[in-house]
Image: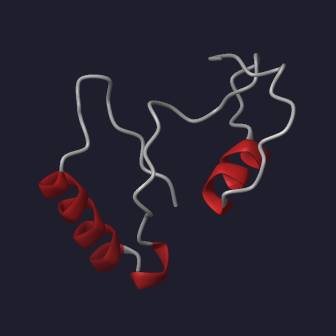
Amino acid sequence: MSVVLHADQTLTPPLQQALRTLVRRQVGAYAVPRTSCRAAPAKTRSGKIMRRVVRAEYLGLPVGDVSGQENE
């Protein structure tokens, strides 16, 4: 599960704990987000989320070719 903050928000420890508690209560313990934070998910030029890039970042694997990424 990914959490994307608005541009005017910063990830503070109290906000991070509140997000973890909310996800744990609403979805379940398996979906609690890790501590990594991005400004926005990687998207293609057509606006679709590049799931392989998000998955690679989540697992700590090499991202690979991102030449088609819109926001890089």
> In the visual, does 30 lie left or right of 69?
left
**Residue that lies at the very extreme toward the left in this rendered image:** 14
> In the visual, does 22 lie left or right of 5?
left
Rendered residue at 42%/41% (across/down): 4
Rendered residue at 65%/17% (across/down): 72
The image quadrant of residue 6 is top left
Marker count (numbered) = 0
Which is more toward the observer, 71 or 59?
A: 59
Which is more toward the observer, 35 or 24?
A: 35
Q: In this view, does 71 lie above or below 52?
A: above
> In the visual, does 72 lie left or right of 12?
right
Q: Where is residue 10 in the image (x, y as percent from the top left)?
A: 24, 35
Rendered residue at 23%/32% (across/down): 9
Q: In this view, does 37 lie above or below 22?
A: above
Which is more toward the observer, 15 or 35?
A: 35
Q: Is residue 65 above or below residue 32?
A: above
**Residue that lies at the very extreme toward the bottom in this rendered image:** 29
The image quadrant of residue 71 is top right
Which is more toward the observer, 48 or 58?
A: 58
> In the visual, does 45 lie left or right of 30?
right
Rendered residue at 69%/16% (across/down): 70
Figure colour scheme: secondary structure
Q: Where is residue 57 in the image (x, y as percent from the top left)?
A: 65, 50
